[in-house]
Amino acid sequence: MQFFKVKESNLNSDLKGGNEILIYSLLEDRMQASTKNKDFFSKKFNDYYVIYTRDELAMKLGVNVSTITEVFKRLVKKGYLVMKHQFNGATKLFLPKFENETNPEANNGNVKREIQRPEIGKPNSSRTLNSNKQITDNTNDTCSRTNSPKDSNITQKPVVQKPDQNKVIKQAELDVIANSLVTKVHLPKQAVNIMKTFSFGDPKKLYAYAGLLFKAKSAVSKQAKSIQNAQEALSFELNTDYQETLDTDLKRIIVLANKKTSQPDGYMMASLMDMFQNKVNDYCSHDVQSVIG
């Protein structure tokens, strides 16, 4: 016969009724095993997770699946459970309040805890002062040489460069495409500016970036057609998360695609699909009915 532990702290918590306490205790029991297996560690959320389906829990406790669903809803509401739906697998269950008794180090970086981290890339203060001093010294030296009597009598005529006609035309085409992406397709302007920057003045490059973006979105839309609210999650207008993160995501994907692979388009397509899948997962995780596996 297999036993599992029910913590005394769970009995004295805001978990109400036997079902909540038992189900959460079962999740904690499985989490103890997950923390010993790196395959159950999410780099994205910097935390361990468990896989426990509603059917499995219902069979173990001898209750209906609907009962498990209702308890999951209450655990999510109380902050004991965070659910992340996966397209091609079971839902990942994170336990923000879980405390690992056998491996206390695994408690660090829990998905819901706020941890004070040092600012990455912040320069050492002494180094900053020395650097500023060096810059000041160099500036003073430059000024003294620039304003020397020897150079004061030299008069230079400004060079007027004629604009390159082809460059002007390409820039106009680039602006037209960028404006259409913002006004007609409703892409965030910051995201369009990122694609425009990495097009390096080539309208065909901007058009190709936009084509890959919408191709990836369409592919994920087909994958997620049976998921409630998925289409809303994919909408640039309805999902406000795109306004905040799409430009950063695109910059990262484009840079890595051109730096780390010989097939940038293939890398970008896969990365963009992964991005849209995460958008759906994150958006739908607010609706428990949409994400329960």
Image (cartoon, helix red, strand yellow):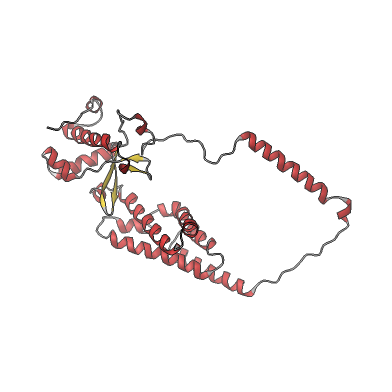
Q: Nearer the viewer, residue 70 or 279?
A: 279
Along the horizontal axis of the image, is 126 left or right of 94? right
Q: Quadrant of the N terminus?
A: top left
Quadrant in the picture for residue 44: top left
Quadrant in the picture for residue 78: top left
Along the horizontal axis of the image, is 197 left or right of 112? right
Q: Which x, y percent locates residue 153?
A: 88, 57
Q: Which x, y percent locates residue 222?
A: 29, 63
Q: Which x, y percent locates residue 75?
A: 25, 38
Check the image and report above or below for 49 versus 219.
above
Quadrant in the picture for residue 267: bottom left
**Residue in the image at 34% along x and 29% along y:** 104
**Residue in the image at 27% along x and 60% along y:** 225
Along the horizontal axis of the image, is 133 left or right of 115? right
Judge whether residue 160 can be spotted in this image.
Answer: yes
Q: Nearer the viewer, residue 192 or 123?
A: 123
Instruction: Report how many numbered discs are placed on residues in the image.
Output: 0
**Residue in the image at 52% along x and 60% along y:** 193
Q: Which x, y percent locates residue 194?
A: 51, 59
Judge whether residue 236 can be spotted in this image.
Answer: no
Check the image and report above or below for 58 versus 226.
above
Check the image and report above or below for 101 versus 44.
above
